Image (cartoon, rainbow, N blue to C red):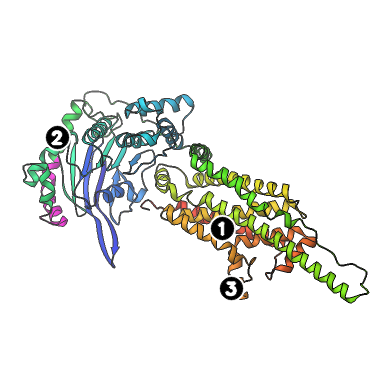
Amino acid sequence: MLELKEVCFTIQKDGDPVNLVNQASFDVPRGHFMAIVGPSGCGKTTLLKTIAGLNPESAGSLWWDGRNLSEDGDLEPWEIGYVPQFSIAYDELTVDEAVETATRLRVKCRNTDELDQRIDRVLEETGLAPIADRHIRVLSGGQKRRLGLAMELVSDPKLLLCDEVTSGLDPRSEREIVHLLHDLSRNDGRTIILVTHSLAHLELYDSILVNHEGSVAFHGPPSQLTHYFSVDDSEEVYPTLAKQSGIEWQESWAKHRQAYYQKLARTRELHIEAGVIKLPDTDESAAEDPDEPAKKKTKSTPPRLPSTLSQFGTLLARRWKIFFRDRTQVLLQVAILLCFPILVTFFAERGKEPIKRLSDIPEENIVLELQSRVEVREDQIRVGSAVSGMIMFEVILLALMGSNNAAREVAGERKIMEKEKFGGVRPISYLLSKLAFLSCLILAQSLWMAMFVEFFWQFSGSFASHVAFLILVNASITAICLAISSVMKTPEQSSLLSIYLVGFQLPLSGAVLALPEFFETVTQPFVSAYWAWSGSIEALGGNIHTAVDVITETELSPGNVCFFALCAQTFVGIIIAWMGIVRHQWDN
């Protein structure tokens, strides 16, 4: 049984406390189908999220099967299912793949047969078996709501919370969803609570809870709804609610609650006796014949969560599947891989030109010696500018690749991630899957860039060091943009900030124009492009290094310092990304 005792959820508004859930008290028995109804903005979803544990109660307590959730912790992921109003699946997957992924993430199956049986059972229960091979992007609104239910039923939750899953549906689809939820509540003592604005199909619910301004105005049998509010039709309930405040309705309900609860209890007993509601043998409310010997009650083993490694593998496999099915993203990655290195090679010819050396034999003619020095200087400026520009161009393009890799990686699927975390997916599994996926992109992009450019311009210094700095600048920008994506509220905000990050890399690197000394000291540690550019120049050595040094006023840092600076930026980006993924951002 679910019990709420004087539960409040309070926020601060203009410095004053406001109860969005105001001293809610009601009971919901096992095997019960309840609707939370009320006008728009009355706090229905807020109440449901408080039951789910997404909104921490400010006062009062929630109880589940005699356990105080306010003190003993939230429900286990397998005990509760939450179906939000928004879609919780990727359009690129099929129905079967979405349900299979949800099962692999939430339930540890002994073998493939058990996995397949669980998937098939859920598809049959929700009526999705005939369209199991259909892609999610072509499903109707009602089919997507069924899919949301199927993805929650994989763990056999005993408490299923549904938020506006009938909103926006045509009357037929709405009726089908409500009938489906009614049928699901009749098996194994599953409690289902549905938030809805609609007052249709009231006869299918075991009880109706009317919410008004965050307060419980009524909770009783659907047949008593019009009687309690003294109206002829259920559609007149909402206008009647507006005649009093939520607190006044709640005070009025407190006086009549016991009588209506007695009617609910009698109706429930009749349904249990008639077999309409089927409770498991372990249910404490199951009637026992006193003349019969006490039956030994068997307790079903609850499903276990898969390991961190298993969840990581499932998430990574899904990410690659989505990537290859997104033709736009694949074509963009291919275009970047092909076009960006070609742009860099435009600098290659000038970078390969030899630089004249001053003769060790002193010129007898001072004019010829000065002329020789001028020619060497001109060669240094010409070649140094070309090499410096080519390396910086590599660095900036790889930074742009890193931004493209990660700018929307978390923010673009925020709601799905939050829903999966609620269902038992560990944040570390999610982060590791992102890092593994992005690492493959980083290595492919950086190695291809380095090898392509090397083919046209033989790197005169340590090629391995050059490759390392290209990988690190890509990794650092990718990690920082992943961090941005994990803390921003929307993918649009994340993309915009990531673009600004790359845009400021060139002017703040000091490679084009030297920065004021005080400004350079503050900004340089945070500019990945500077460290990659400086480290690559250091790796050149010899005349090329000297030539680049001639044309820039920015002091070059030692290679080992550049290496550790880029590693530190990558590490910081990953830590911030981890913090953003762990933090609850359901409402973003």
Marks 3 and 1, Cα distance to the nearest angstrom? 22 Å
**Res 17 → quadrant:** bottom left
Q: Amino acid at mark 3?
A: Phe
Where's residue 146, x and y in %? 32, 34
How far is the residue under mark 1 from the one under mark 2? 61 Å
- Mark 1 closeness class: few <14, some 14–19, many ≥20 residues within 10 Å: some
> In front of the other: label 3 or label 1?
3
Q: Nearer the viewer, residue 440 or 59?
A: 440
Q: Is residue 378 above or below residue 177?
A: below
Q: Is residue 99 above or below residue 410?
A: above
**The stretch drawn in magenta includes residue 282:** no
Of pointers 3 and 1, the one earlier in the residue sequence: 3
* Disc 1 residue type (three-letter): Val
- Which numbered disc flags the more N-terminal residue, 1 or 2? 2
State whether residue 214 appears in this view. Answer: yes
Q: Position of residue 239 (x, y in %)?
A: 11, 50
User: Which residue is disc 1 drawn over?
Assistant: 572
Q: Residues within 10 Å of mark 2 (few under 14, many from 20)?
A: few
For the magenta stretch, what is the residue range? 243-261
Q: Give left or right: position of 270 versus 559.
A: left
Mark linked to residue 519: 3
Neighbours of disc 3 within 10 Å: few (<14), some (14-19), many (20+): few
Q: Residue at x 63, y 69 (%)?
A: 513
Q: Nearer the viewer, mark 3 or mark 2?
A: 3
Q: Using the image, tell me which numbered label, if any, was put on residue 266.
A: 2
- Residue 412: percent from left, percent from top: 44, 48
